[in-house]
Amino acid sequence: MGALNLPATGSIYIDANIVIYAVEKIEPYHSFLSPLWQVVSSGTLCIVTSELTWLETLTKPIRDGNYALETIFHSFLTAREVQLIPSNLAIWEQAARLRSLGLKTPDALHAATGIAAGCSLFLTNNLIFSRVPGLPVSVLNIEIAK
């Protein structure tokens, strides 16, 4: 298994699947991401994500009536180490431009938010983000296979 290559400083953008892997402890991703959470808890790096992640992660627990899991997602996304980036018109316009690369609307919003936040690393498990020029993407399945 490869190792997660983390930047020395800055912010790391995580999309919804990374949050789900962390909260639901889905392997092998949960173990692979462990060094990230250790560095973040030390204050060296911070986590950023779109408010869209709130919607994407809470939908299933709400639909399933799983209040316990819903509460855990709430706690994770409101932790002091996690910054939710609100959408604004500049992000929406950038997302519209990114749609021309073949990204679906939610993916375009995540990428545009990561760009707006100036993230040092964009963690995902979706290869489509590699199409976005200048986005420092790390795809977990590829990193684990190294």
Image (spheres, rainbow, N blue to C red):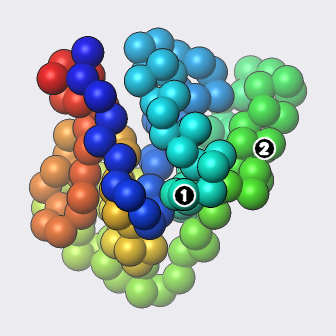
Would you place residue 1 above or below residue 37 in this image? above
Residue at horizontal 19 percent and vertical 19 percent from the top = 145
Instruction: Quadrant for the C terminus, please.
Output: top left
- The earlier-in-sequence mark between 2 and 1 is 1
- Point out residue 89 in the picture as x, y percentages from the top left corner: 47, 86
Q: Between residue 45 and residue 116, name the one nearer to us.
A: 45
Which residue lies under the disc numbered 1? 44
Q: Amino acid at mark 2?
A: His
User: SS for tag 2?
Assistant: helix
- Point out residue 93 in the picture as x, y percentages from the top left corner: 35, 82
Would you place residue 136 above or below residue 19 in this image? below
The quadrant in which residue 52 appears is: bottom right
The quadrant in which residue 87 appears is: bottom right
In this image, 12 relative to 6: left or right?
A: right
The quadrant in which residue 143 appears is: top left
Residue at horizontal 35 percent and vertical 47 percent from the top = 6
